[in-house]
Image (cartoon, grey):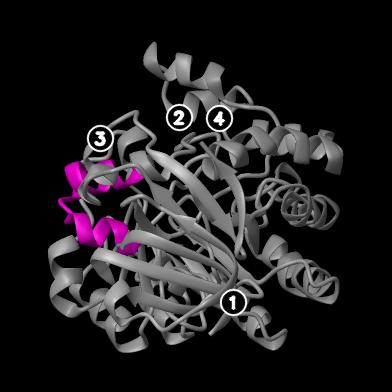
Amino acid sequence: MLCDTVWTNARLAGVAPEVGVVAARDGVIVWAGPSAEAPGFGAAETIDCDGRWITPGLIDPHTHLVYGGDRAREFELRLAGASYEEIARAGGGIVSTMAATRAASEDELVAQALPRLDALIGEGVTTVEVKSGYGLSTEHELKSLRAARKLGEVRPVRIVTTFLGAHALPPEFKDDADGYVDLVCREMIPAAAAEGLCDAVDAFCEGIGFTPAQTRRVFEAARAHGLPVKLHAEQLSNLHGTALAASFGALSADHLEHLDEAGIAALAEAGTVATLLPGAYYFVRETKLPPVESLRAAGVPMALATDCNPGTSPMTSLLLTMNMAATLFRLTVDECLTGVTVNAARALGRADLGVLTAGAVCDLAIWDIERPAELVYRIGFNPLYARVFGGQTTWTR
């Protein structure tokens, strides 16, 4: 079998736990399995992994990586006892991030996002979803999406972009949510689609966000432009946004702390992924756990993501995300690993990512570990040995 690169003497998570081989040609896996079953290879390069473990490249399927400024001062104020409402009245919250994002140029947004992206890449992440949602005007939402696309041009990483214009109300629409939704549907989504700037459309369906009726309008506009949908749903209350998202065949519904049995059944029927965000749960000191046991029983695939954002989850570590999912949400090691690989890929509509199988994109993470549980168990420890993106080694220790 002709190929460009063969990785030998490896242990393949979920495929070959003893000794295995991965072979790639033109950036695509052509064979992955136990060494004893491997065909003969005519390879330009053979890499001996010396017994190390290989997983698919990790995938972060929910981030808000592109934004201006930070909210560290607000964090201090909250620790001192200030409420979210008090901070917002003083010009903080999403309004402060919006102002900083609008003030930044596209290149400045890229420069500010790169350290966050580099932290993810340094942990073996090869695909990152990036949402807009801090510009809250046509000009600045498109600018944010262009900045996100540019990240994939200046780093060896796959960027999947999501339009999140229906994230919050900008000050100019403070008392006119329906008017702002009109703008999102009539102008923003068509403009983003025309430029090919987004791969999906998202919304924040919540009491402090947008109603189910307003969310439906956003989804209908997305559908009219051939774009799949995702949804921030049931984080702070149960508005039944998850069932709405499922009715549109959503790729994922995210957060889900207040999800009920009807919403779980809708996810299961639609095949929509439940994306859990333990970083936000931890950072805002939530007490309502997502219904993991019920999701598991219903066979709903669960993905995990950092939810990297300046206000409620300033986290850039999928390894820590997995540990939080295990300790806070009681996910198993296998659930954590599939949550940042195959299920994360599914949440992005990418069946060709997150798996070690012939025909999949050859994105790999090679780890200096004795067993995969170490990736979930250890805190503040990065055992990445090498990162492979599209068949090319982009980093090695």
Amino acid under label 1?
Cys
Residue matched to label 3: 378
Quick check: 242 above or below 326?
A: below
Q: Is residue 262 left or right of residue 293?
A: right
User: Can the viewer see residue 344 in this picture?
Assistant: yes
Numbered range of the magenta stretch: 321-339
Mark toward the viewer: 4 or 3: 3
Q: Earlier in the sequence, mark 3 or mark 1?
A: 1
| Residue 84 image label | 2
Q: Residues within 10 Å of mark 2 (few under 14, many from 20)?
A: some
Structural distance between the alpha carbons of marks 3 and 1: 36 Å
Q: Residues within 10 Å of mark 1 (few under 14, many from 20)?
A: many
- Which three-letter amino acid code belongs to the residue tagged 2? Tyr
Q: Amino acid at mark 4?
A: Ala
SS of the residue at dot 1?
strand
Residue at 84 percent across and 76 percent down: it is 194
* Alpha-carbon span between mark 2 and mark 4: 6 Å
Is the Cβ of the residue at disc 4 closer than 8 Å to that at disc 3? Answer: no
Where residue 187 appears, as percent x and y from the top left, is 82, 70
Q: Position of residue 238 (x, y in %)?
A: 31, 62
Q: Earlier in the sequence, mark 3 or mark 2?
A: 2
**Quarter of the figure with residue 25:** bottom right
Determine if the magenta segment contains residue 336.
yes
Residue bearing the label numbered 4: 88
Which of the labelled discs sits on residue 3, or is there none? 1
**Spatial separation of the CA atoms under disc 4 and disc 3:** 37 Å
Secondary structure found at label 4: helix
Asked whether disc 2 touches disc 4, contact meaning CB atoms under 8 Å apart, the reply is: yes
> Which type of secondary structure does the marked residue at label 3 adopt?
loop
